[in-house]
Image: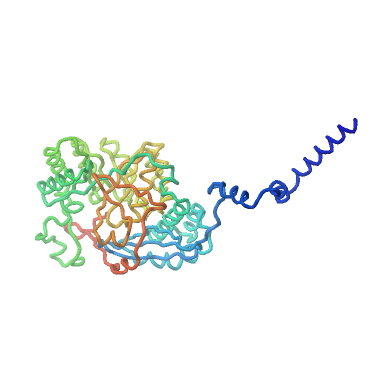
Amino acid sequence: MDSKNKATLANRRDMLKMLGMGSAAGMFGLLGGMSTSKAKTLDKETPQYAKGAAPVTITKVRAITTAPGGNNLVIVKVETSEPGLYGLGCATYTQRAAVVIPAIDTYLNEFCQGRDVDNIEDMWQSAYVSSYWRNGPVLNNALSGLDQALWDIKGKRAQVPVHQLLGGKTRFAIDTYAHASGRDFEEVCESVARYIERGFRHIRIQQGGYGGVGLNQDFVPDFQKAGYGKPGDEFMDQRTYLKNTPKMFEAVRKRFGEDIELLHDVHERVEPIDAINMIKRLEEYRPFFIEDPFSPENMGWFKKLRAATTVPLAMGELFNNINEFRDYMANQLFDFIRIHISQIGGITPAMKVARLGEWFNVRTAWHGPGDTSPVGHSANNNINIAVWNFGIQESQFFNERVHEVFPGTPTIENGYFKVNETPGLGIDINEKEAAKYPIGTKSKWTIRKYDGTIIRP
């Protein structure tokens, strides 16, 4: 090899040797001749996602209670090591709100401190089994609030609404159903007419309260005459309810025709065989769905009901565990998933059930009454806008006090929940305003037959 080729080979070896040096030395060599201003320009051109984010840990978990709309609401606030960054979640258990507070302030607070806010699945799984016994409504509500708050934080850190983290939009807004009721069929029809004028396409119809409770205030049932039970216990005439419900559907259909979708909630308040017979009679009125025909203790009746009628069925707001949905969805025994997001464990498990439903053409119909806080409704809507198999959402109108306590409270236009595009769940809480409306401990859920036997919801 001549001297010229030897020199070229040596130069190549020197170049390879330089490229093989450590990153720091390599960068020094590459940028050594670059001015400071040029180096800063290169750093600015690095996209934000490539820079990453420093870990953020949980510093405190605490409960905030309030009742601006009359229902007891429990909110979880997760504070973090990043100044000003916190998340909110709904842990509302209206009937037993006070017992959820220590589960949050004492147990979850100690359990969560120092943990990475990003690891939501790990946090959920570890909190779920850390008490050993699980699936109770108190711990599930506390866990639900924690989970939603962590998703709220993740959305804020990513600077996007939570639904973008769940896959993005699959529709422009969230269709809802309203609640129409009255003391008689005429009042029910008038209530339906008012909601149609407001743009609702789906309306749930009930005569009186669930099962007609409270229709005849002057009537004194036998158990009350005998002094049995407590003075505030309510009465339900199951026979009258079973007789009147098909007549109510007939009256509403006769007045409004077939264009409006009608729903009804049995609320598990009659015997299973009576529910089956009544739902068969409702078939000719084409309900959008009939909700909660059986209590959780009577789920075995679903096969008989499905065999007896083609009326769509909705179930699940009393389920504590996501596994309670599995077999009934896989066997297509009901058509709509009635998850109460503050009961099931939050966004993480609700998304799992929703995705499972897609495989079996079972749609979502999240529970959303007044005892779901605006934070919980925001969590519902972030799922609703993202999942393909969305069915319908229960609507809720919040008074001015609620809007003052919860800036960003969801609103409804033309029967649709508007979707909040603010990062996270898109909702906040004014703790000073919240403190003006303390929660109570009384609940009114005791309903009896003529002889005083408890009727299960």
* Residue located at (32% from left, 69% from top): 435
Residue most extreme to the top: 1
| Image coordinates for residue 337, horizontal then vertical, percent | 34, 44
The residue at the point 18 percent across, 51 percent down is: 238
13 or 102: nearer the eye?
13
Left or right: 61 as drawn, with respect to 176: right
Does residue 440 appear in this view? no
Residue located at (78% from left, 40% from top): 15
Residue 375 sits above or below residue 310 on the image: below
Image quarter of residue 214: bottom left
Looking at the image, residue 312 sits to the left or right of residue 154; the answer is left
- With respect to residue 457, does 361 lie above or below? above
Residue 449: x and y in percent read 19, 57
Can residue 404 be seen here? The reply is yes
The image's colour scheme reads rainbow
Image quadrant for the C terminus? bottom left
- Closer to the camera in the image, 387 or 157: 157
Q: Nearer the viewer, residue 254 or 268?
A: 254
Residue at left 13%, top 65%?
A: 225
Q: Point out residue 415 in the picture as x, y percentages from the top left corner.
A: 24, 45
Image quarter of the N terminus: top right
Which of 423/397 is in front? 423
Q: Quadrant of residue 332?
A: top left
Where's residue 384, x and y in %? Answer: 35, 45
- Identify the residue at the far right of this view: 2
Q: How many numbered circles are shown?
A: 0
